Amino acid sequence: MARAVRYEQFGGPEVLDIAEVPEPHPGPGEVRVRVTAAGLNPVDFKIFHGGPVAQAFGGAPGAGVGNDFAGVVDELGEGVSGFTLGDRVFGGKRHEALADFLITTPESLQRTPEELSDQLAATLDIAGRTAAAAIDQLGLSPADTVLIGGAAGGVGALATQLAVATGATVIGTASERNHEFLRDLGAIPVSYGDGLPERVRDLGTPTAAADLNGTEVIDTAQGFGVPAERITAIAAHGHDAGGFTATGGGDAAPGALGRIAQGVADGTLSLPLEASYPLEEVADAYRLLEEGHVRGKVVVTLV
């Protein structure tokens, strides 16, 4: 038997249980991964809370939890090539990451760079692809000033660094505890909340924006006259003002995730871990994530 996180009703982290389930085995063309770590994302708890996000992602009572994982290939189905037993890999599998084993396809896996820990690799699938998509679509140059909302979170920290690398001036919203962190990344920090447009105006005039935490930065950018094609957002569900490009990890350019993983491995990109929990404390891990103000990522370890 193996362990897997499940929920039998919608609700908060208290509905999460660690269930004993039969070990899965790969069919033809499939790979089994022994999961060593799983990175948490806000979309995870939005799914097990129920409602529109659960409907959008096919979440339902009885389902598993999580998406991002890292681990080791430990079984190969018939006809699989390109991987061998013991290969370190990372990737994403919706509703299945928080489990001892998962079955996936070789095409969905990335090789974990030798210098990269499984804990960090396990945080990259959604954050890396989404950050790359959000910034690449803006076409930034040194002539730009870009406003990034939620700049200290998992997606935000990577997006901020990718934006800085273009030569653009980067203004990032964050709580006060994360301002020095953003300065270290090369960004100009600004507190979110009431009065944001006035605080931004004191720092510069945005020519582009990426809202990675709701809609506040969308509204602020629109107020500065930033054109629609230069505003991207990842969590603007229900925002009816228009004037932005909804984006996600699926919009990332081919190879973007591998490049980000290598950047984190060699230190040219930084992605901090706010906290690491054992599987038995998965509910506490999600409680921390739900509180907000997380710097970087939260990860759950399985071995």
Image (cartoon, rainbow, N blue to C red):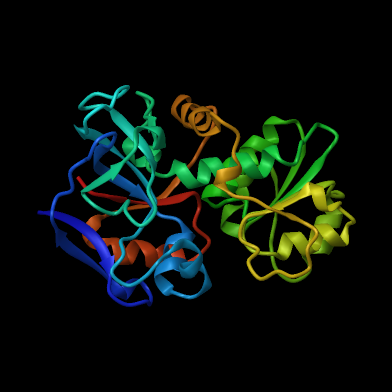
89 sits left or right of 194 in the view: left
Q: Is residue 258 visible?
A: yes
Q: Position of residue 152 (x, y in %)?
A: 58, 51
The residue sitting at 38% across, 77% down in the picture is 11
Q: Position of residue 208 (x, y in %)?
A: 80, 47
Front residue of this view, candidates 6 and 212: 6
Can you say which quadrant of the picture contains the N terminus?
bottom left
Q: Position of residue 52 (x, y in %)?
A: 53, 72
Number of disc labels: 0
In the rendered view, would you say 263 is above or below 35? above
Q: Is residue 181 visible?
A: no
The residue sitting at 21% across, 27% down in the picture is 86
The residue sitting at 51% across, 36% down in the picture is 270
Q: Quadrant of residue 98?
A: bottom left
Can you say which quadrant of the picture contains the C terminus?
top left
Q: Quadrant of residue 108?
A: top left
In the picture as drawn, the residue positioned furthest to the left comes out as: 1
In the rendered view, would you say 280 is above or below 92? below
265 sits left or right of 254 in the view: left
Q: Position of residue 74 (x, y in %)?
A: 19, 34
Front residue of this view, candidates 267 and 31: 31
The residue sitting at 13% across, 55% down in the picture is 22
